[in-house]
Image: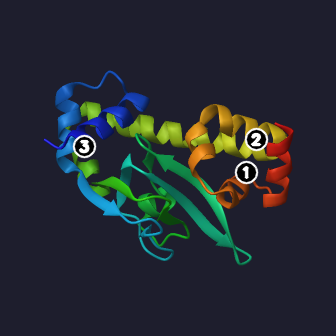
Amino acid sequence: MDALLKDTVDKAINSRFPDMSPEGRKLIRELLVRKELAKGELLLKEGEVSRHIVFVGQGMIRQFYYKNGKDVTEHFSYEGCIAFCIQSLFKQEPTQLIIEALEESVVYLLPYKQFLLLTESCWEANLFYRKLMEYSLIVSQIKADAWRFETAHERYHRLMQQHPEVVKRAPLSHIASYLLMTPETLSRVRADI
């Protein structure tokens, strides 16, 4: 068995549903398809339909979109994280989000339609799916609240506390756009800390 695959699935599942049985984990592992990405390679392009939930085994990816000619980072994912374009995945319509490898990466693709079939026959897969969606909604709410109510310093501090890997590994321009700051503002915030 691919040791990275097992480790990736365990990390991802443990973050949402640590009580899932070895049998349930095996059913999910059996659906995953390994894909290696070069730095800068796009896993999902604007206008494509998202058909997978992405488990990150190695490396870092980001989801971003273009607004007024500038790219805006929506989300970062690294080892043990899960990423997906929820609207495109659910509605099976073209996405505005792009998924890019920020480093050489190994990801595992969970085909959405096959996963849905599994959720019908395996209660643990169904519960894991529900927990994925709940977590996604919570993260979206926290991010929206941070944009509305937190200062630039508070947003950066939260990122440092919750996702130090992003601060260490992602380009500053992407971190700035994720935090809705200019690179100059981010530089001042970092200097203050």
In this orientation, which residue lies closer to the viewer: 156 or 122?
Answer: 156
Q: Quadrant of residue 120?
A: top left
Residue contact between numbered discs 3 and 2, judged by CB atoms under 8 Å: no
- For label 3, the residue is 5
Residue contact between numbered discs 3 and 1, judged by CB atoms under 8 Å: no
* Residue 9: x %, y % from top left: 30, 38
Count neighbours of disc 3 (C-alpha within 10 A) and say few if under 14, some if 14 to 19, many if 20 or more.
Answer: many
- The vertical placement of 91 against 32, above or below, is below
Which quarter of the image is occupied by the C terminus? top right
Q: Which amino acid does label 3 sit on?
A: Leu
Report, in whole angstroms, how far the alpha carbon at label 1 lies from the one at label 2: 7 Å
Q: Which amino acid does label 2 sit on?
A: Arg
Residue visible at 41% across and 37% down in the picture: 130
Report, in whole angstroms, how far the alpha carbon at label 3 lies from the one at label 2: 33 Å
Determine whether the residue tagged by mark 1 lies in a helix, strand or loop: loop
Q: State which tag comes first along the sequence, 3 or 2.
A: 3
* Residue 37: x %, y % from top left: 36, 63
Residue visible at 46% across and 46% down in the picture: 78
- For label 2, the residue is 155
- For label 1, the residue is 179
Which residue extends farthest top? 19
Which quarter of the image is occupied by the N terminus? top left
Q: State which tag comes first along the sequence, 1 or 2.
A: 2
Residue 120 in view: no
* Residue 113: x %, y % from top left: 28, 57
